[in-house]
Each structure stands twice: as structure tokens, then as C-alpha cells.
Image (cartoon, helix red, strand yellow):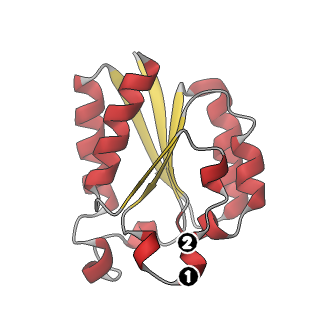
């Protein structure tokens, strides 16, 4: 069974509590359980993590080089600011899918630019937490 990692950036630990009008009422634990079940049905082991620290996310990407066949990443605010995360993603050989819960293109202009998209094999935005499930399905296809 191939392993995929779902990496989540700052403030996603508050999913379900923070701005539910934008991000919905599901928690990150709900996302983890749904994705694990879906992944299992598709022959994938799903490991989900969250950090509020850029360096920790970079370390997670580096570690995934040895443990994961693919990455799904919601870098949250780091999307728009972190060349360092982009550089780390360039060291990962497997597929990368970028996920955003909200439609970032319908929000503030600074959210329209993503450094991560320069490495991502696909980008999913605006599907709510269902975007994670779409990403798991796509990752299963990419990993064959």
C-alpha cells in the first residue's frame, strides 16, 4: 500500500471554528478520517499533519522524500509567501497536489498568487473540505 502525506499549514488546526462562513464546520480531524477511509478504499495509506511553522512544514516535506509516494498540501497562508516551501517541494520526486478549501481567486488579491502552484501537478480550490477527497482520488490515479 503506497503512503501519501497530507500537509496542512497555519491556522488549519482551527478548521471548523475559524471563519466557518469561509471554511465550513468540518474539523481537520473530520478531514483526516474521511481521507483515511477514502485512501484505504483506493489502496493508499493516508497520513495527515498540520503545523503553524514554516520550518516544520519544510522538514515534513524533506521527510516525505523517504516515506511518501505523493503529497497533498494545503500550505494556507504560506502559499502566497514561501519560496522556501516551493524549494522544498522541488526536492520531492512524487506528485504534488495543492488544495485550498476556499476559492482563493474570489478573495483578496494577495491570495491570487501561489508559489506552491509552480511545483504542483494539480490545484484544487473552492470545493470546501471535499477538495481533499478530490485530491486523494486524483493522487490514486497519478500513482496508478
At a point 25% along the width and 53% down the height, the residue shown is 130
Residue beneath disc 2? 112
Q: Residue 66, how many percent across, how many down?
A: 66, 25
On screen, residue 98 above or below 67: below
- Considering only vertical position in the picture, is 84 above or below 14? above
Quadrant for the N terminus in the image: top left
Where on the picture, by quarter, is residue 40? top left
The location of residue 45, given as percent across then percent down, is: 38, 27
Q: Position of residue 106 (x, y in %)?
A: 40, 77
In the image, taking residue 67 as reference, residue 133 lies left or right, namely left
Rendered-image quadrant of the C terminus:
top left
Are the two marked residues, 2 and 1, in contact with CB atoms closer than 8 angstroms?
yes
Query: Dot 2, crowdedness within 10 Å: few (<14), some or many (≥20)?
Result: few
Q: Residues within 10 Å of mark 1 (few under 14, many from 20)?
A: few
Residue at (23, 34) in percent of width and height: 37
Q: Position of residue 141 (x, y in %)?
A: 37, 24
- In 3D space, how far apart are the residues under numbered discs 2 and 1 (Cα atoms)? 5 Å
Q: Which residue is mark 1?
A: 109
Q: Is 47 on the left or on the right of 29, as rendered?
A: right
| Residue at x-position 38% and y-position 69% | 103
Q: Secondary structure at mark 1?
A: helix
In the image, is residue 23 above or below residue 4?
Answer: below
Q: On the picture, is 131 further left or further right than 104?
A: left
Amino acid at each position: 500500500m503506497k503512503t501519501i502525506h497530507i500537509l496542512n499549514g497555519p491556522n488549519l488546526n482551527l478548521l471548523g471554528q475559524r471563519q466557518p462562513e469561509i471554511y465550513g464546520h468540518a474539523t481537520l480531524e473530520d478531514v483526516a478520517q474521511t481521507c483515511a477511509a477514502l485512501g484505504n478504499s483506493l489502496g493508499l495509506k493516508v497520513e495527515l499533519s498540520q503545523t503553524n511553522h514554516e520550518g516544520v512544514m519544510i522538514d515534513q516535506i524533506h521527510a516525505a522524500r523517504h516515506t511518501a509516494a505523493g503529497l497533498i498540501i494545503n500550505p494556507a497562508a504560506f502559499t502566497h509567501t514561501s519560496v522556501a516551501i516551493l524549494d522544498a517541494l522541488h526536492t520531492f520526486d512524487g506528485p504534488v497536489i495543492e488544495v485550498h478549501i476556499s476559492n482563493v481567486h474570489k478573495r483578496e488579491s494577495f491570495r491570487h498568487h501561489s508559489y506552491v502552484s509552480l511545483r504542483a501537478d494539480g490545484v484544487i480550490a473552492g470545493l470546501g473540505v471535499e477538495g481533499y477527497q478530490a485530491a486523494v482520488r486524483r493522487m490514486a490515479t497519478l500513482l496508478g
